[in-house]
Image (cartoon, rainbow, N blue to C red):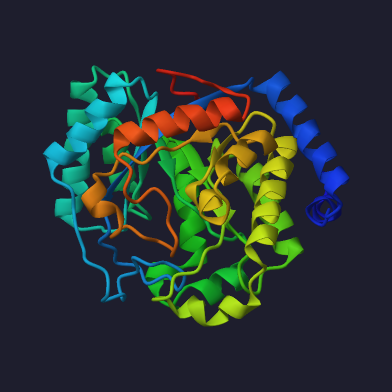
Amino acid sequence: MTRSELIELLSIDDPKALQRLFARTQVVQSSVVGTKVFLRGLIEYSNRCRKNCYYCGIRGGNRRVGRYELTDGEVLQAVDFAWRNRYGSIVLQSGERQSARFVSRIARLLRQIKEHTHGEVGITLSCGEQPDEVYRQWFEAGAHRYLLRIETASPALYARLHPATPAHDFDARITALHQLKAIGYRTGTGVMIGLPFQTPGDLADDLLFFRRMDVAMVGMGPYLEHRDTPLYRYKDRLLPPAQRLTLALKMVAALRLLMPHINIAATTALQALHPTGREQALQAGANVFMPNLTPVEYRASYRLYDSKPCLHESPGLCMDCTACRIRLAGNEIGYGEWGDR
């Protein structure tokens, strides 16, 4: 599809035309990647972050959030739950840090996870921008996927979402994605949908960026505001929640048509806009689900946006809920499968 065709697709608002679009993506998904949904157990390792992104609730400049870091035992307990319940993979996610202690601790955890699960559980890292040698160290320690969201492929919009400092450089972000791919990671990225100042052309360019980078996975969802961020002042410019949800679903569908083999996450932010938001994403073309395995007592502190769902459900409840949601969407779970494409 061309840029103009993508813009036209993202502008669809007729309900019957939307039904036809989602029916088409289901046909493509079923014939190319099948109906399995792959589980990635999410472990929010730490909310300490050196970045100051204008949209993020755990930005380093937010003094109202209590900071935490899981112990090795808490991480391994969550990993053990995922392994025993046949989650194919886990995602170890944190705010961005580059200290020697942080780097070595992640490497140690990776080795412990591999040893504990006999190498059966795939590991995705989402720990921000790092020097090339750190990416290599973590890859050799056992991580095989890395998720580094670009948030927007527009340099101009990126500049409006981040402070003008060396730590928030658009070109550095792009370079990091190339480095990850060169090392051998199955590299994922993603964007926010429905941002202030964002145009349909920006979103079309995001989709074309994914294809140009030939990423293995995309995790994209609706932008949701957080009251303790600078971007919150523009909340009156946002689309209503229902329209933001529909736009996000159209992005999922467009990406499935544009890159039929890719893994697409049904992100938690979708559920913040509608109770069945993630199921709707599965029906629009998503095939990855990330149940939250973070200990309940820490979840409210890893709040990237207001109205974050699933703050109080135990991993067991999340597991039962996940299985039910996936079945209701007409899919099956790829138990014990990494789900690499």
152 left or right of 15?
left
Q: How many marks?
A: 0
- The x and y percentages for residue 161 are 51, 72
Q: Identify which residue is drawn at 55% across, 35% down.
A: 216
90 left or right of 215?
left
Q: Identify which residue is drawn at 23% across, 17% down.
A: 118
- The x and y percentages for residue 163 are 44, 77
Residue 258 placement: quadrant: top right
Residue 236 placement: quadrant: bottom right
Q: Is 279 located above or below residue 35 in the figure?
A: below
- The x and y percentages for residue 48 are 25, 61
Viewer-proximal residue among 5 and 182: 5
- The x and y percentages for residue 141 are 25, 32
Q: Identify which residue is drawn at 24% across, 25% down.
A: 114
Task: Evaluate whether residue 336 shows in this view.
Answer: yes
Task: Evaluate whether residue 341 shows in this view.
Answer: no
Viewer-proximal residue among 153 and 324: 324
Location of the N terminus (image quadrant):
top right
Residue 252 placement: quadrant: top right
Location of the C terminus (image quadrant):
top right
Q: Is 242 located above or below residue 250 in the figure?
A: below
